[in-house]
Amino acid sequence: MAENQEFYFDASLLRDSGLSVEDLQRLNNDELITPGHHSLNIYLNGKFITHGDIEYSRRGENVEPCLSHELLAMIGLKSLPPEAKTSCYWGDDAVMAGVRRKEDLAQLRVDFTVPQALLKTIPRGSVSEASLDAGESMLFLNYIANQYHVKSRQGNAGGMDSSWLSLNGGFNLGLWRYRQQSNLSYSKYEGSRWSTVRRYVQRAIYPLRSELLLGEGFTDGQFFSSMGFRGFQLSSDTRMLPNSQRGYAPVVRGIAKTNAKVTILQGNTTLYETTVAPGPFAIDSLYPTSFAGDLTVLVSEADGSESTFNVPFSALAESMRPGAFSYVYTLGRTRDVGDNELFSELVWRQGLTNSLTLNLGNQLAKGYMSYSLGSVYSTVAGAFGLNTMFSRAKTTDNSYRSGWTMRANYSKFIPQTGTSVTLAGYRYSTAGYSELYDALGSREASRRGAQWQSLSWKQRNRIEISAGQTLGELGDISLSASSQDYRDSKKRDKQLQFNWSKTFKYGIALSLGIARTYNVLPGMGNSAWQNSGSMPTFSLRNQMQTMWSLSMSVPLGDQRYSPIVSTSAHRSSDSNSHDGGYQTTFSGVYGERNPLSYSLNYSTDYKGEQSVFGGGLQKSFSYANAGMSWSTSKNYWQASGSLQGSVVAHKGGVTLGHWVGDSFALIDAPGASGAEIIGGQGTRVDAFGYAIAPSLGAYQFNSIGLDPRNMNDDAELQTAQQRIAPYAGATVRLRFNTLSGQAMLITAQHPKNIPMGAAVYDGYGNYTGMVGQANQIYLRTNDKEGELRVQWGNHAEESCRIEWLITPPRKPLLLMDLPCR
């Protein structure tokens, strides 16, 4: 049933006004809705759930909607049968008992109010499959163009010019989408070269909450080394889950004695609050909150009593919610290592409890197999991860070697002290263990008479740690360290980094960084690949290096776009040389819309012998981003320019825009040139009525609005905002209805005062509005002349006609006094 009327025009109060009872009825709330299909935003208990068409029909004296089975299923009524028993349901049907409805046509929305007891439990942030939009077929191309020039000032050394163009685009056919990444480069000495980085076809398989890829891609890389492949991949897409089910968060379980309020806090932040019935309860719809500390649960009973308990919350990247799972299966041939060899890979993760996540994996190829088994365990002391892998690989002499590796990691955040150990890891490998990437690469290198090298090849031990500490008024510090050794002649790699930073009053920031490394690097004195007869060998050298830097930034004012001056000093030293220098930069942003970013910089070495002046500009236009830079020293001068944006071809023509993301929208607003997309990086509707909203979140509702302040005066928006939930990769057209033409405010001259609210019809009999105060009528039209009929009764003398004619010059609003005969 509909809610009670908020207002009602009583005809007796306007007696002798000249308006008929039918005219007055049009002003009542129900009669603002005419029979037919209406496209409305649908809200449930104040929260948006979908956008859809609702059919309204006259029943007796009222106009009421007949609601479809799909819409009521989306709302989640418990009383709704699993299958539709009728084509639609009216407000007095049994399944609608307890449901209240209220329309607001000014906002194009309808609100349903339903008691929680009558609703099924639906996770927060859920988007039904019926609400998802696959978009339409469009051809799009992202581009980055860069031109670089450098000229030497020394003798006849000459200069260099190079051009580079990156193209990334594709097209959609329903849910299928083709994507390609290619590059074109040109230089005077090498000529032009075209290369295609990747080509593939993808589509969403929503019932499986998965994504299918055919073509060129990359493996998961979480447990095994990431590899490029050409083939087939099926993987879970967590974006298809409700927002409250993505990422890791524990299930909160407890017992309430009464109808109790449950509040879940993390530190001083309230994450969730709800009311539960007496008895056991489980809350499984918390949004993921990274590693921000344990949860505190407060149960406030109806009798005034309270109880609290804690839920440990520490997580690693592999952590899953209880009952949740994810997988990646790949079958294909290698692209970047080996000799186009066939392989398969499977990785599966399963959340068993709040504390325990299990993961397993497998890789198979000719002459190679490996298995992975591991888990993550969350406790009050932190999250611990342990993973073991076994491999058996065929070597270059046709024998087999086997081995295993163990990986352990840890994560913990202590909010009381502001201490975080974001990652601590340890890995140990036996002599016989090898990754598939290394096994294939070493075979190929052996066939070519070369020696194989990679970061993981013959690695024995690796340990790493990264920690941070908040010191309050003294700033923040962070520390990271790593060490690894190998099973051949290479010595141990070591790295240690320390950083301190603090922001003072007036936005002044200071930071200090120190790093010390001991690396095993390819030899610099000789070629990394040295020929010894027909057998190349790999030359290595050890390098110890210490680096430190001190930087400070000072804003020149307290306005939003006040420029900033930053200066820094750095110094590095190794066993062969000492190096260092100083740099000062003046930078800022000018303009609110389509801002201009600028910078000027000066740098020199610590001896003052190599000084460089430079600068740069970055400008965001409505249809692209452009940049330029220059620098000069006593040895050279350099200049470059770049342009980045997109081109979208659709059935209405070709539209330019900013770089588009995985999913984007084409705005179709005829006549609305100049209107700006809210949050669209300054994009405006072009002269043809189109614009690009460059990025949409997949499988969630996105609000897209137009700001009409700079819009063409000859048009007005009938729809200012829309909501859309696209599939991943969807190219969606959003139609914004507009009225175009000359706007007129006509004062009707009539012997009698025309009643306010009298109906106005155009020359085609279409209802265009009502008469306002002082006999005024608003009209917007593309016609140069026409006729209006004003009707305020059922008799011939209760109507009149107005003939109008537009004469130059055109104005944003044309004021006219015309007779109504």
Image (cartoon, rainbow, N blue to C red):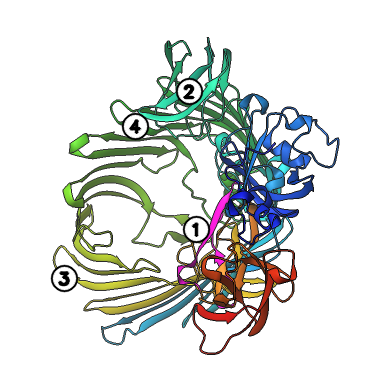
Q: Which numbered disc, 2 or 1, marks the residue that appears first in the sequence? A: 2
Is residue 699 a member of the stretch shown in magenta? yes
Residue named by callout 3? 609
Look at label 2 and name its amino acid.
Ser
Earlier in the chain: of badge 4 and badge 3, it is: 4
The x and y percentages for residue 495 are: 32, 42
Outermost residue, left direction?
607
Q: How many marks?
A: 4
- Residue annotated with mark 4: 420
Residue 378 is marked as: 2
The image shows residue 687 at horizontal and vertical percentages of 56, 78
Check disc 1 and report its element: helix, strand or loop.
Answer: strand
Q: Quadrant of the rendered structure where residue 576 is?
A: bottom left
Q: Earlier in the sequence, mark 1 or mark 4?
A: 4
Where is mark 1, residue-wise?
A: 536
Mark found first going from the N terminus, 3 or 1? 1
User: Which of 580 and 596 lies nearest the eye of the viewer?
Assistant: 596
State the SS at label 2: strand
What is the magenta range?
A: 687-711
Q: Comparing marks 1 and 4, which lies closer to the viewer?
A: 4
Q: Which of the two labelled residues, at mark 2 and mark 3, occupies the earlier sequence position?
A: 2
Real-space Cα separation, disc 2 to disc 3, in angstroms:
56 Å
* Mark 4–mark 3 distance (CA, rounded to whole Å): 43 Å
The alpha-carbon separation of the residues under discs 2 and 1 comes to: 49 Å
The relative height of residue 288 versus residue 186 in the rendered view (above or below) is: above
How far apart are labels 1 and 4 at the CA level?
47 Å
Q: Amino acid at mark 1?
A: Pro
Would residue 48 be found to the left or right of residue 87 on screen? left
